[in-house]
């Protein structure tokens, strides 16, 4: 008798094809749940597929989702935050929850720096005005990046990545002191 594929519920609409292929070669089939699908729909999907694993990206993994499949053996979070997973329900069933700490740290840091620069350069305001038919060239006074201070709260993986990227931004030169 052929061994059926075990099912992995992925809480997003797709993952890299190489990951799907790797899972397939190891006896797993990916079942995709669109991002932020309501928990009651995820419960039905988990129950109907009798999932053995959940790869959490987006959406909530409630106690009902965890209880939906007796075959569930592991939950893996793509990222570090587990605030969208009912850890107590997983622990009560002996289901380990693993995190991929730092998995998206560079992407999040790049996004943070991009948004900071966009705000410093007033891009949302300028974009809205231009799309609304206004040309603010004469009235707009821009802000330089040079000399702008960046404050980071927390130096976890993302904070350190953000700091590393920010080091590439221009800084004022220190005045040189000449000896008399």
Image (spheres, grey):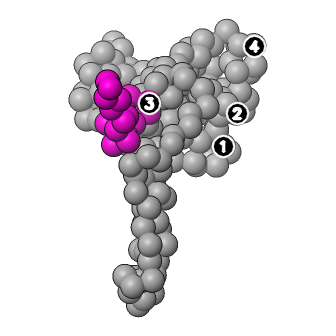
* Location of mark 4 (residue): 92
Quadrant (top left, top right, bottom left, bottom right) of the C terminus: top left
Residue for badge 2:
62
Residue 132 or 143: which is nearer the viewer?
143
Q: Are marks 2 and 3 in contact (CB under 8 Å)?
A: no
Identity of the residue drawn at 59% across and 42% down: 59
- Tell me the CA gap for discs 1 and 4: 19 Å
Q: Is residue 133 above or below residue 10?
A: below
Of badges 1 and 3, the one in the foreground is 3
Image disc number at residue 105? none
Give the residue at mark 1.
39
| Callout 1 secondary element | helix
> For mark 3, what is the residue?
163
Instruction: Kindly give the residue lying farthest to the top in the view shown.
Output: 94
Instruction: Give, as a single range, the part of the protein colored magenta.
Output: 162-180
Whether the magenta-drawn stretch holds residue 151 is answered as no
Secondary structure category for the residue under label 4: helix
Q: Earlier in the sequence, mark 1 or mark 3?
A: 1
Q: Earlier in the sequence, mark 1 or mark 2?
A: 1
Mark 3 in CB contact with mark 4 (< 8 angstroms)? no
């Amino acid at each position: 008798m052929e061994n059926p594929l075990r099912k992995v519920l992925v809480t997003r609409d797709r993952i890299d094809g190489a990951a799907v292929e790797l899972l397939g070669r190891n006896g797993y089939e990916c079942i995709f749940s669109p991002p932020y699908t309501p928990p009651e729909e995820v419960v039905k999907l988990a129950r109907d597929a009798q999932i053995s694993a959940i790869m959490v990206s987006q959406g909530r993994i409630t106690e009902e989702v965890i209880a939906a499949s007796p075959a569930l053996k592991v939950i893996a979070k793509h990222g570090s935050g587990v605030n969208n997973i009912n850890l107590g329900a997983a622990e009560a069933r002996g289901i380990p929850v693993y995190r991929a700490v730092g998995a998206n740290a560079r992407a999040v840091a790049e996004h943070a720096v991009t948004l900071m620069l966009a705000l410093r350069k007033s891009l949302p305001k300028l974009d809205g005005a231009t799309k609304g038919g206004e040309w603010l060239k004469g009235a707009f006074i821009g802000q330089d990046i040079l000399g702008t201070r960046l404050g980071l709260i927390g130096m976890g993986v993302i904070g350190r990545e953000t700091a590393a990227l920010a080091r590439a931004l221009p800084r004022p030169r220190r005045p040189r002191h000449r000896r008399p």
